[in-house]
Amino acid sequence: MSLTAAQIAHQVKTKERSATSVVKAALTQISNQENHNCFTTLLGSSALTAAETLDRQLAAGETVGPLAGVPFAVKNLFDIAGTVTLAGSKINQSHTPATQDSTAVARLKAAGAILVGALNMDEYAYGFVTLNHHYGVTPNPHDPSRMSGGSSGGSAASVAAGLVPLTLGSDTNGSIRVPASLCGVYGFKPTYGRLSRAGAYLFSSSLDHIGPFARSVEDIALAFEVLQGPDSRDPICTDRPPIAPDLSGDMTGIRVAMATGRSKTIATEYFSQGMTATVAQALEKVSSALQVTQTVTLPESARARAAAYLITASEGSQLHLQRLQTRLQDFDPATRDRFVAGAMMPNSWYLQAQRFRRWYRDQVREIFKTVDLIIAPTTPCPAPLIDQTTMELDGQTVPIRPHLGHYTQPLSFIGLPVLSVPIFLPDQLPVGIQLIARPYDENTIFKAAVALEKLGVTEAKVASSIG
Amino acid sequence: MSKLPASTSDGSDAFNSAYVTEVAKLLGLSIPSDQLPGVVESFEQIHRIAQPVLDFPLPDTLEAAPQFEP
């Protein structure tokens, strides 16, 4: 399914195609391509019923939403009424089915989108790889020998594979942006608290965000628009009024800077460390297209990343302590030891990390007095091989799993809105570049993203490597 | 903020191993002996990562936000 969500909604609303035919096609494609291993739950029957209902509404002349007939899927940590929320775990299999949809799912459905299933992820969202011990690996659609990234790997890969045009994921330290980068799609993490997380299985409360994946900026904006709004079910969700996405592409007056140095001087500062040549070229392309002439330094980003790690370890472990006490052996070994160790952290470490967080936020706020948009790479490299465990970072051999979040973690740490945009260089696997704005200024990101898309610098291609 | 014991093979691994074992009891965690090294290694990692954050001087007046706002 190479059509975007906007194109599908247009065809359905103009009755060029029925929602039922669209959903049937998506379900057939998903079933025929099980080697993608994107889906952990398929909801064929309810999806077809919803599509038929929508077609009847259209036939009766009723108004339908902006995402009418668009098949979508969600990371399997979003509650779906009548379905068990697995969160990538074995333990949750014994949970009772959710009694209501998560707010995000409900809002997309209310906009006319049709939910077709739930997607693979790292267990409890603790990872950047989607190599799930219980539900298997989700390979990269552009090269199945490589990883899709995580933890929202199923969400990114299913969009890249053309199985669905729109998915939802969650991002604590980069779990939307990392797989978006490796799979060559758009992945959007709005400002912390902008979108309701009600009914989404928590990982690290003070760091968790939700957001969409798609193959066009317009689709990201369509989803963002309908997902916004206050929600009494989520105490973190802002009561600010929703904003209308600005897709004008007008960059007039927008001051753009690159985070710490150009590619010609890589390996000198944090947001250049470990950058491969492919990533450097992609960054240069975006920099050139946006006419970037200045650089900014986000001070102490390495410490920010460390503090984010501590907060994640502590909050995530606290959430799972009872399960660690009673069902330790049912955890994925890749997450088990980290959770157990996190539970043992002295609280002074956690509180120092939270105090540092406020300091870091204040420093970055100062930077946004002089610039409106910052660009930085999303991942240090294109998709690593699935069985690859280490990578080179500035001459050092480091483990891959944590370092895929090298560039993403300091930004989610203080809740900034970020869109990872896809860059395909000739004969290279895709990589992502982050567009970063001040809190609640998602529109500056949309303007830049549209400008890049119009210039042909960014593009999300449907993969053809997995049959 | 006082220095943590250095996390190297000079004996501090033993310190962390002992810490992990004792705290596991406090937390009611039964860690099989074959899985203990993995937990100790993970704790060593947290220990290493924590040090630069703990070393960073912050004013006493800087409070952790009860509810974080960006």
Image (cartoon, coloured by chain):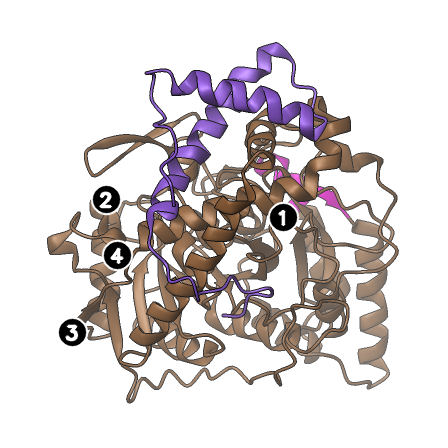
Q: In the image, is B37 to the left or to the right of A232?
A: left
Instruction: Say whether residue A95 is left or right of residue A264.
Output: right
Q: Kindly report the distance in space between the C-alpha atoms of the residues bearing marks 1 and 2.
A: 30 Å
Marks 4/3: CA–CA distance: 16 Å
Residue A145 in view of the camera: no
**N-terminal of the two: label 4 or label 1?**
1
* Chain identifier of the residue bearing label 2 in the image: A
Q: Circle 4 is placed at which residue position?
A: A282
Q: Position of residue B59 (x, y in %)?
A: 38, 62
Query: Same subunit under labels 1 and 2?
Result: yes
Quote the CA–CA distance across marks 4 and 1: 32 Å
Image hue for chain A: brown
- Mark 1 neighbour class, 10 Å CA radius: few under 14, some 14 to 19, many 20 or more: many
Tag 2 residue: A276
Question: For this rendering, which residue is in front, A412 or A444?
Answer: A412
Mark 1 sits on what residue?
Answer: A203
Q: Is residue A442 left or right of residue A195?
A: left
Q: Which chain is purple?
A: B
